[in-house]
Image: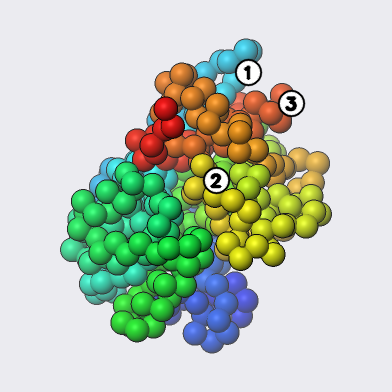
């Protein structure tokens, strides 16, 4: 059974309200346990991620807040003799993987009678929350850094969200959101700090297993706060335990060199951004991964195995070529997603096959430089 608890003092997530940190010790909530129904059989007549609804730890009678999330295509290509599989998370309803987590969160918001929420986001999470909130009658207030890309802001505004642009680095938007939460009392529906999205994101891994009819040799994903990467790891761990599958899967996390705190820790190097007031050295085209202090970073670092897994960084000048290279192959995804292709090209010559590349968000969310 899937349950949520404080990662420090193990307090079970309260049954009312929507605290974003543990009321007892201030810790971050996480998935205490994640279990899912068997895969590969008819699970439920529900669509998309809701086939796995019993894995979400929702209370009975929780509504299915479905807008088309999940069950995204896995496109298998043989490129230069290597079996690659592209998971098209850009084809979710708001055009990013965030919808898997947002859908689960929205169901909880409805069950708890919450009518208005606060969030901060560099773009994709805010666009996703704005859309799901609007569709299910919840008002959203989204704090975004002023550098967030226009198409993502347009998505939020089109959904009727109250969008507040905050000058300065990404962290300023986070602090402004916290201040607004304190002033208004509205819940902080943080995609990074609330644990519910992880169960939704873990379904990516269950789908990959069903679509390949085996576990992949390698899974490659960008790492910002780490919700995607950690969610996939949770899905993988649950698959290996519950299905008694012992095959090892190499996990590869990718960050832009301009903001690569986990890569620095993984390599035992100092992270220069720690001393920079703006957090990361310079803005990166991979805007979804510009996170100075990844919420799931410690768990990811502890779980990865040296000699098998990898955390790698991509230089800024390699991101746009990877973006265009993917577009040329039929995958129009944003630069944050292109990190995985750049990583494969640079480091992937010996990665175990099949190699799954998670394409996180649509290229339509980005203004290409002509
Ligand atoms: Zn606690």
Please tell me whether residue 86 is drawn above or below residue 278 in the rendered image: above
For image coordinates 43% across by 75% down, the residue present is: 178
For image coordinates 52% across by 55% down, the residue present is: 227
List the residue tagged with mark 2. 284
Query: Could you give the CA–CA distance between mark 2 and mark 1, rounded to whole angstroms?
Result: 30 Å
Residue 18 horizontal side relative to residue 36, left or right: left
- Is label 2's Cβ within 8 Å of ligand 1? no
For image coordinates 54% across by 49% down, the residue present is: 283
The reply to whether residue 48 is visible in this rendering is: no
Residue 183 horizontal side relative to residue 28, left or right: left
Question: How far from the left and from the top, in percent, is residue 318?
Answer: 61, 31
Please tell me whether residue 164 is drawn above or below residue 183 in the rendered image: above
Query: Could you give the CA–CA distance between mark 3 and mark 1, rounded to whole angstroms?
Result: 10 Å
List the residue tagged with mark 3. 350
Please tell me whether residue 331 is drawn above or below residue 98 in the rendered image: above
The mark closer to the camera, 2 or 3, is 2
Question: How far from the left and from the top, in percent, is residue 307?
Answer: 81, 41
Q: Determine the image quadrant of residue 332.
A: top left
Along the line of sight, the residue nearer the viewer: 171 or 119: 171
Question: How far from the left and from the top, in percent, is residue 276?
Answer: 65, 62
Along the line of sight, the residue nearer the viewer: 357 or 254: 254
List the residue tagged with mark 1. 82
Please tell me whether residue 135 is drawn above or below residue 322 in the rendered image: below
Asked whether the residues under the numbered discs 3 and 1 touch, taking CB atoms below 8 Å apart as contact, a structural biologist would say no
Asked whether the residues under the numbered discs 2 and 1 touch, taking CB atoms below 8 Å apart as contact, a structural biologist would say no
Along the line of sight, the residue nearer the viewer: 60 or 348: 348
For image coordinates 24% across by 54% down, the residue present is: 157
Question: How far from the left and from the top, in percent, is residue 301?
Answer: 70, 56
Disc assigned to residue 302: none
Residue 248 horizontal side relative to residue 12, left or right: right
């Amino acid at each position: 059974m899937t349950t949520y608890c404080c990662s420090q003092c193990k307090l079970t997530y309260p049954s009312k309200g929507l605290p974003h940190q543990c009321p007892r010790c201030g810790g971050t909530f996480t998935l205490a346990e994640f279990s899912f129904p068997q895969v590969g059989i008819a699970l439920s007549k529900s669509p998309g991620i809701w086939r796995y609804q019993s894995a979400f730890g929702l209370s009975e009678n929780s509504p299915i807040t479905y807008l088309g999330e999940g069950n995204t295509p896995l496109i298998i290509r043989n490129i230069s003799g290597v079996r690659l599989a592209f998971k098209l998370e850009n084809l979710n309803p708001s055009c990013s993987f965030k919808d898997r987590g947002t859908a689960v969160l929205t169901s909880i918001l409805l069950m708890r009678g919450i009518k208005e929420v606060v969030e901060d986001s560099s773009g994709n999470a805010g666009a996703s929350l704005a859309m799901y909130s609007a569709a299910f009658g919840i008002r959203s207030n989204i704090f975004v850094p002023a550098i967030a890309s226009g198409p993502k802001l347009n998505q939020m505004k089109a959904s009727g969200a109250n969008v507040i642009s905050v000058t300065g680095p990404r962290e300023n938007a986070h602090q402004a959101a916290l201040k607004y939460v304190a002033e208004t009392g509205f819940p902080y529906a943080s995609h990074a700090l609330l644990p519910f999205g992880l169960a939704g994101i873990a379904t990516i891994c269950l789908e990959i297993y069903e679509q390949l009819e085996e576990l992949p040799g390698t899974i490659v994903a960008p790492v910002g706060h780490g919700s995607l990467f950690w969610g996939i790891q949770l899905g993988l761990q649950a698959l290996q335990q519950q299905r008694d599958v012992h095959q090892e899967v190499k996990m590869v996390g990718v960050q832009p060199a301009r903001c690569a705190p986990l890569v620095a820790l993984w390599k035992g190097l100092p992270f220069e951004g720690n001393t920079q007031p703006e957090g990361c050295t310079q803005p990166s085209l991979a805007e979804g991964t510009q996170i100075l202090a990844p919420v799931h970073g410690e768990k990811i670092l502890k779980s990865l195995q040296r000699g098998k897994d990898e955390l790698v960084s991509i230089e800024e000048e390699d991101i746009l070529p990877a973006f265009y290279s993917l577009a040329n192959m039929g995958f129009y995804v944003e630069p944050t997603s292109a990190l995985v292709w750049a990583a494969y090209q640079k480091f992937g010559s010996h990665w175990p096959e099949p190699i799954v590349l998670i394409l996180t968000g649509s290229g339509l969310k980005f203004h290409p430089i002509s």
